[in-house]
Amino acid sequence: MNFLIGAFKPACNISITFSDGKTRKQISIEPFQGKKIEHNGVKVELLGQIEMYFDRGNFYDFISLVRELDVPGDIYERKTYPFEFSMVETPYETYNGVNVQLRYVLKVTVSRNYGGSIMEYQEFMVCNYPPPPSINNTIKMEVGIEDCMNIEFEYNISKYHLKDVIIGKIYFLLVRIKIKNMDLEIRRRESTGSGANTHVETETLAKFELMDGAPVRGMLITSYFLHILRPDVAGESIPIRLFLSPYELTPTHRNINNKFSVKYYLNLVLVDEEDGRYFKQQEITMYRLQDS
Protein backbone atom coordinates (compact mmCIF):
# COMPACT_ATOMS: atom_id res chain seq x y z
CA MET A 1 0.00 0.00 0.00
CA ASN A 2 2.92 2.33 0.60
CA PHE A 3 3.53 2.47 -3.14
CA LEU A 4 0.17 4.19 -3.59
CA ILE A 5 0.98 7.09 -1.26
CA GLY A 6 1.06 10.26 -3.34
CA ALA A 7 0.03 8.46 -6.55
CA PHE A 8 -3.06 10.64 -6.92
CA LYS A 9 -1.47 13.94 -5.94
CA PRO A 10 -0.85 16.57 -8.65
CA ALA A 11 2.58 16.39 -10.28
CA CYS A 12 3.45 20.04 -9.58
CA ASN A 13 2.72 23.15 -7.61
CA ILE A 14 1.19 26.13 -9.46
CA SER A 15 1.31 29.66 -8.02
CA ILE A 16 -0.11 32.89 -9.46
CA THR A 17 1.49 36.21 -8.49
CA PHE A 18 0.07 39.69 -9.11
CA SER A 19 3.13 41.73 -10.05
CA ASP A 20 1.50 45.16 -10.00
CA GLY A 21 -1.79 44.40 -8.29
CA LYS A 22 -3.71 44.92 -11.49
CA THR A 23 -2.75 43.50 -14.89
CA ARG A 24 0.86 42.26 -14.92
CA LYS A 25 1.14 38.82 -13.37
CA GLN A 26 3.28 35.73 -13.46
CA ILE A 27 2.65 32.03 -13.11
CA SER A 28 5.17 29.61 -11.63
CA ILE A 29 4.99 25.87 -12.21
CA GLU A 30 7.28 23.72 -10.08
CA PRO A 31 7.36 19.92 -10.41
CA PHE A 32 7.55 17.98 -7.19
CA GLN A 33 10.96 16.52 -6.41
CA GLY A 34 11.96 13.69 -8.71
CA LYS A 35 9.11 14.28 -11.17
CA LYS A 36 8.84 15.83 -14.58
CA ILE A 37 5.72 17.17 -16.26
CA GLU A 38 4.98 16.10 -19.79
CA HIS A 39 2.37 18.47 -21.17
CA ASN A 40 0.57 19.50 -24.34
CA GLY A 41 0.68 23.19 -23.54
CA VAL A 42 0.10 25.71 -20.74
CA LYS A 43 -2.55 28.42 -20.86
CA VAL A 44 -4.14 30.98 -18.58
CA GLU A 45 -7.73 32.25 -18.81
CA LEU A 46 -9.28 35.40 -17.38
CA LEU A 47 -12.93 34.71 -16.58
CA GLY A 48 -15.74 36.93 -15.38
CA GLN A 49 -18.55 34.69 -14.13
CA ILE A 50 -22.02 34.86 -12.64
CA GLU A 51 -23.33 31.92 -10.63
CA MET A 52 -26.94 31.58 -9.52
CA TYR A 53 -27.19 29.59 -6.31
CA PHE A 54 -30.36 27.83 -7.48
CA ASP A 55 -28.25 26.65 -10.46
CA ARG A 56 -25.07 26.05 -8.49
CA GLY A 57 -22.07 24.87 -10.47
CA ASN A 58 -23.21 26.44 -13.76
CA PHE A 59 -21.33 29.66 -14.48
CA TYR A 60 -22.38 32.29 -17.01
CA ASP A 61 -19.22 33.81 -18.49
CA PHE A 62 -19.40 37.49 -19.44
CA ILE A 63 -15.60 37.69 -19.88
CA SER A 64 -13.48 34.87 -21.34
CA LEU A 65 -9.92 35.64 -22.48
CA VAL A 66 -7.08 33.19 -23.10
CA ARG A 67 -3.28 33.54 -23.23
CA GLU A 68 -1.16 30.61 -24.43
CA LEU A 69 1.94 30.41 -22.21
CA ASP A 70 3.88 27.40 -23.48
CA VAL A 71 4.02 24.91 -26.36
CA PRO A 72 4.00 21.13 -25.71
CA GLY A 73 7.09 19.89 -23.92
CA ASP A 74 8.53 18.83 -20.58
CA ILE A 75 9.08 20.76 -17.36
CA TYR A 76 11.89 19.47 -15.13
CA GLU A 77 12.28 22.39 -12.71
CA ARG A 78 10.53 25.55 -11.60
CA LYS A 79 9.44 27.57 -14.62
CA THR A 80 7.95 31.07 -14.59
CA TYR A 81 5.63 32.56 -17.22
CA PRO A 82 4.99 36.32 -17.16
CA PHE A 83 1.71 37.35 -18.76
CA GLU A 84 -0.59 40.33 -19.04
CA PHE A 85 -4.23 40.99 -19.86
CA SER A 86 -4.14 44.59 -21.02
CA MET A 87 -7.04 46.89 -21.90
CA VAL A 88 -9.56 44.56 -20.28
CA GLU A 89 -12.85 46.13 -19.27
CA THR A 90 -14.32 44.85 -16.02
CA PRO A 91 -17.76 46.47 -16.16
CA TYR A 92 -19.20 44.86 -13.04
CA GLU A 93 -18.06 44.76 -9.42
CA THR A 94 -17.38 41.58 -7.53
CA TYR A 95 -20.57 40.68 -5.66
CA ASN A 96 -21.51 37.91 -3.19
CA GLY A 97 -25.21 37.99 -2.45
CA VAL A 98 -27.92 35.77 -1.01
CA ASN A 99 -28.71 33.98 -4.27
CA VAL A 100 -26.03 35.09 -6.73
CA GLN A 101 -22.27 35.50 -6.99
CA LEU A 102 -20.31 37.57 -9.50
CA ARG A 103 -16.61 36.74 -9.52
CA TYR A 104 -13.41 37.21 -11.49
CA VAL A 105 -10.96 34.34 -11.67
CA LEU A 106 -7.64 33.39 -13.26
CA LYS A 107 -7.58 29.76 -14.42
CA VAL A 108 -4.29 28.04 -15.29
CA THR A 109 -4.42 24.78 -17.24
CA VAL A 110 -1.51 22.39 -17.85
CA SER A 111 -2.87 20.07 -20.56
CA ARG A 112 -1.83 16.41 -20.43
CA ASN A 113 -2.76 13.24 -22.32
CA TYR A 114 -2.70 10.98 -19.29
CA GLY A 115 -3.34 11.55 -15.62
CA GLY A 116 -5.74 14.40 -16.43
CA SER A 117 -5.00 18.07 -16.98
CA ILE A 118 -3.78 20.10 -14.01
CA MET A 119 -5.81 23.21 -13.22
CA GLU A 120 -5.40 26.00 -10.71
CA TYR A 121 -7.86 28.81 -9.91
CA GLN A 122 -7.35 32.14 -8.21
CA GLU A 123 -10.14 34.63 -7.62
CA PHE A 124 -9.54 38.36 -7.40
CA MET A 125 -11.78 41.26 -6.47
CA VAL A 126 -12.83 44.09 -8.77
CA CYS A 127 -14.09 47.44 -7.42
CA ASN A 128 -15.32 50.17 -9.77
CA TYR A 129 -15.22 53.89 -8.99
CA PRO A 130 -17.64 55.85 -11.17
CA PRO A 131 -17.51 59.65 -11.11
CA PRO A 132 -19.78 61.23 -8.47
CA PRO A 133 -23.27 61.96 -9.85
CA SER A 134 -23.57 65.38 -11.47
CA ILE A 135 -27.27 65.55 -10.52
CA ASN A 136 -28.31 64.47 -7.04
CA ASN A 137 -31.87 65.50 -6.26
CA THR A 138 -33.45 65.65 -2.82
CA ILE A 139 -36.06 63.14 -1.75
CA LYS A 140 -39.47 64.21 -0.50
CA MET A 141 -42.31 61.89 0.44
CA GLU A 142 -45.40 61.90 2.61
CA VAL A 143 -47.29 59.51 4.85
CA GLY A 144 -50.87 60.56 5.37
CA ILE A 145 -54.40 59.62 6.36
CA GLU A 146 -57.08 62.11 5.36
CA ASP A 147 -57.93 64.49 8.22
CA CYS A 148 -55.87 62.36 10.65
CA MET A 149 -52.20 62.48 9.82
CA ASN A 150 -49.84 64.17 7.42
CA ILE A 151 -46.12 63.60 7.90
CA GLU A 152 -43.49 64.67 5.38
CA PHE A 153 -40.02 63.18 5.01
CA GLU A 154 -37.16 64.97 3.32
CA TYR A 155 -33.62 63.75 2.61
CA ASN A 156 -30.90 66.01 1.29
CA ILE A 157 -29.86 63.78 -1.64
CA SER A 158 -30.93 60.54 -3.35
CA LYS A 159 -27.50 59.09 -4.28
CA TYR A 160 -25.00 58.13 -1.59
CA HIS A 161 -21.50 56.72 -1.57
CA LEU A 162 -20.81 53.78 0.74
CA LYS A 163 -19.28 55.92 3.51
CA ASP A 164 -21.77 58.77 3.19
CA VAL A 165 -24.15 60.30 5.73
CA ILE A 166 -27.90 60.43 5.23
CA ILE A 167 -29.17 63.83 6.37
CA GLY A 168 -32.85 64.60 6.50
CA LYS A 169 -35.87 65.83 8.41
CA ILE A 170 -39.29 64.54 9.32
CA TYR A 171 -42.03 67.21 9.47
CA PHE A 172 -45.24 66.68 11.46
CA LEU A 173 -47.76 68.73 9.46
CA LEU A 174 -50.92 67.19 10.92
CA VAL A 175 -51.14 64.61 13.72
CA ARG A 176 -54.52 63.59 15.12
CA ILE A 177 -53.67 60.01 15.98
CA LYS A 178 -51.31 58.75 18.65
CA ILE A 179 -48.07 57.44 17.17
CA LYS A 180 -46.57 54.69 19.32
CA ASN A 181 -43.26 54.39 17.52
CA MET A 182 -41.51 55.24 14.27
CA ASP A 183 -38.61 53.35 12.64
CA LEU A 184 -36.28 54.04 9.73
CA GLU A 185 -34.88 50.99 7.91
CA ILE A 186 -32.25 50.45 5.23
CA ARG A 187 -33.27 47.57 3.00
CA ARG A 188 -31.46 45.73 0.24
CA ARG A 189 -33.49 43.99 -2.45
CA GLU A 190 -31.75 41.38 -4.60
CA SER A 191 -33.59 40.16 -7.72
CA THR A 192 -32.31 37.17 -9.66
CA GLY A 193 -33.58 35.43 -12.78
CA SER A 194 -36.26 36.78 -15.11
CA GLY A 195 -39.94 36.38 -15.92
CA ALA A 196 -41.67 33.58 -14.05
CA ASN A 197 -38.30 32.48 -12.63
CA THR A 198 -37.59 35.79 -10.89
CA HIS A 199 -36.62 35.42 -7.24
CA VAL A 200 -36.57 38.42 -4.90
CA GLU A 201 -34.76 38.46 -1.56
CA THR A 202 -35.13 41.47 0.76
CA GLU A 203 -32.80 42.07 3.71
CA THR A 204 -33.18 44.66 6.43
CA LEU A 205 -29.60 45.81 6.96
CA ALA A 206 -30.29 48.43 9.62
CA LYS A 207 -33.24 49.54 11.73
CA PHE A 208 -33.33 52.81 13.68
CA GLU A 209 -35.91 53.82 16.22
CA LEU A 210 -36.96 57.43 15.66
CA MET A 211 -39.74 57.53 18.26
CA ASP A 212 -40.76 55.19 21.04
CA GLY A 213 -43.76 55.87 23.25
CA ALA A 214 -45.49 59.17 23.80
CA PRO A 215 -43.28 62.00 22.50
CA VAL A 216 -42.12 64.67 24.90
CA ARG A 217 -41.35 68.21 23.77
CA GLY A 218 -37.67 69.04 23.78
CA MET A 219 -36.42 65.52 24.52
CA LEU A 220 -33.13 64.88 22.76
CA ILE A 221 -31.99 61.35 22.01
CA THR A 222 -28.46 60.75 20.78
CA SER A 223 -26.52 57.72 19.71
CA TYR A 224 -23.32 57.07 17.82
CA PHE A 225 -25.17 56.76 14.55
CA LEU A 226 -28.32 58.83 14.89
CA HIS A 227 -29.39 62.14 16.47
CA ILE A 228 -33.12 62.86 16.77
CA LEU A 229 -35.38 65.43 18.42
CA ARG A 230 -38.85 64.17 19.29
CA PRO A 231 -41.88 66.45 18.85
CA ASP A 232 -45.19 66.36 20.66
CA VAL A 233 -47.27 68.67 18.45
CA ALA A 234 -47.84 69.35 14.75
CA GLY A 235 -45.38 71.80 13.30
CA GLU A 236 -42.36 70.17 14.95
CA SER A 237 -39.67 68.29 13.05
CA ILE A 238 -37.09 65.55 13.63
CA PRO A 239 -33.60 66.07 12.19
CA ILE A 240 -31.88 62.83 11.06
CA ARG A 241 -28.18 62.16 10.63
CA LEU A 242 -27.41 58.55 9.73
CA PHE A 243 -23.84 57.29 9.10
CA LEU A 244 -23.56 54.51 6.52
CA SER A 245 -19.92 53.52 7.09
CA PRO A 246 -20.59 50.88 9.81
CA TYR A 247 -22.65 48.74 7.43
CA GLU A 248 -21.65 46.26 4.74
CA LEU A 249 -23.23 47.98 1.75
CA THR A 250 -22.49 47.46 -1.92
CA PRO A 251 -23.10 49.73 -4.88
CA THR A 252 -26.48 49.53 -6.57
CA HIS A 253 -26.44 46.96 -9.40
CA ARG A 254 -28.99 47.37 -12.19
CA ASN A 255 -29.77 44.45 -14.51
CA ILE A 256 -26.27 42.98 -14.47
CA ASN A 257 -25.85 40.96 -17.67
CA ASN A 258 -29.63 40.36 -17.58
CA LYS A 259 -29.07 38.08 -14.57
CA PHE A 260 -29.60 40.08 -11.39
CA SER A 261 -30.17 43.48 -9.78
CA VAL A 262 -29.41 44.89 -6.32
CA LYS A 263 -31.31 47.95 -5.08
CA TYR A 264 -31.43 49.87 -1.80
CA TYR A 265 -34.40 51.51 -0.08
CA LEU A 266 -35.13 53.77 2.86
CA ASN A 267 -38.24 52.42 4.54
CA LEU A 268 -40.28 54.42 7.10
CA VAL A 269 -42.56 52.47 9.44
CA LEU A 270 -45.09 54.20 11.72
CA VAL A 271 -47.12 52.31 14.32
CA ASP A 272 -50.08 53.86 16.14
CA GLU A 273 -51.43 52.88 19.56
CA GLU A 274 -53.89 50.45 17.97
CA ASP A 275 -50.96 48.74 16.20
CA GLY A 276 -51.96 50.13 12.82
CA ARG A 277 -48.91 50.24 10.55
CA TYR A 278 -48.08 52.81 7.90
CA PHE A 279 -45.22 52.39 5.45
CA LYS A 280 -43.39 54.63 3.02
CA GLN A 281 -40.50 53.39 0.93
CA GLN A 282 -38.08 55.27 -1.31
CA GLU A 283 -35.28 53.89 -3.47
CA ILE A 284 -31.80 55.37 -3.05
CA THR A 285 -28.74 54.81 -5.23
CA MET A 286 -25.46 53.60 -3.72
CA TYR A 287 -22.06 54.01 -5.41
CA ARG A 288 -18.42 53.52 -4.51
CA LEU A 289 -16.29 56.64 -4.06
CA GLN A 290 -12.53 56.37 -4.49
CA ASP A 291 -10.52 57.40 -1.45
CA SER A 292 -8.74 60.70 -1.96
Image (cartoon, rainbow, N blue to C red):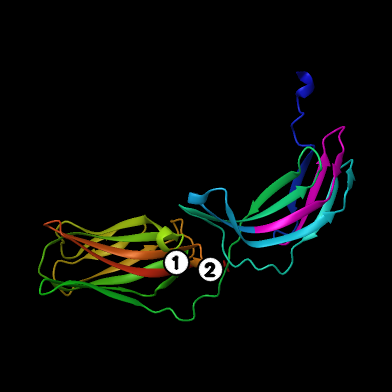
Is 275 a magenta residue? no
Question: Mark 1 highlights which residue?
Answer: 164
The residue type indicated by label 1 comes to: Asp
Residue in view at x 57 percent, y 58 percent: 94
Task: Decide if residue 242 is in sight here.
Answer: yes
Amino acid type, residue under disc 2 in the picture: Leu
> Chief secondary structure of the magenta span?
strand
| Quarter occupied by residue 89 | bottom right
User: Is 3 placed left or right of 266 in the picture?
Assistant: right
What range is drawn magenta here?
Answer: 23-47
Q: Position of residue 37 (x, y in %)?
A: 85, 40
What residue is shown with label 2? Answer: 289
| SS class, disc 1 | loop
Residues at circles 1 and 2 in contact by the CB criterion of under 8 Å: yes
In this rendered view, identify the residue nearer to me: 245 or 199: 199
Which labelled disc corresponds to residue 274?
none
For the point 72% across and 69% down, the residue is: 87
Image quarter of residue 90: bottom right
Is residue 198 at least partly visible in the picture?
no
Q: Secondary structure at mark 2?
A: loop
Residue furthest top in the image: 1
Q: If you read the primary sequence from the N terminus, does the residue marked by circle 1 or circle 2 appear first?
A: 1
Residue pictured at 64% horizontal, 52% vertical: 123
Report how far apart the C-alphas of labels 1 and 2 lie in the structure. Answer: 9 Å
Q: Please report the residue visible at 14 percent of the width from the left and 66 percent of the height from the top.
A: 232
Residue that protrudes farthest toward the front in the picture: 196
Q: Residue 178, percent across and down?
A: 11, 62
Q: Position of residue 60 (x, y in %)?
A: 59, 58
Q: Is residue 215 left or right of residue 164?
A: left
- Residue 126, percent across and down? 61, 60
Does the stretch in magenta take in 31? yes
Left or right placement of residue 188 versus residue 292 in this view = left
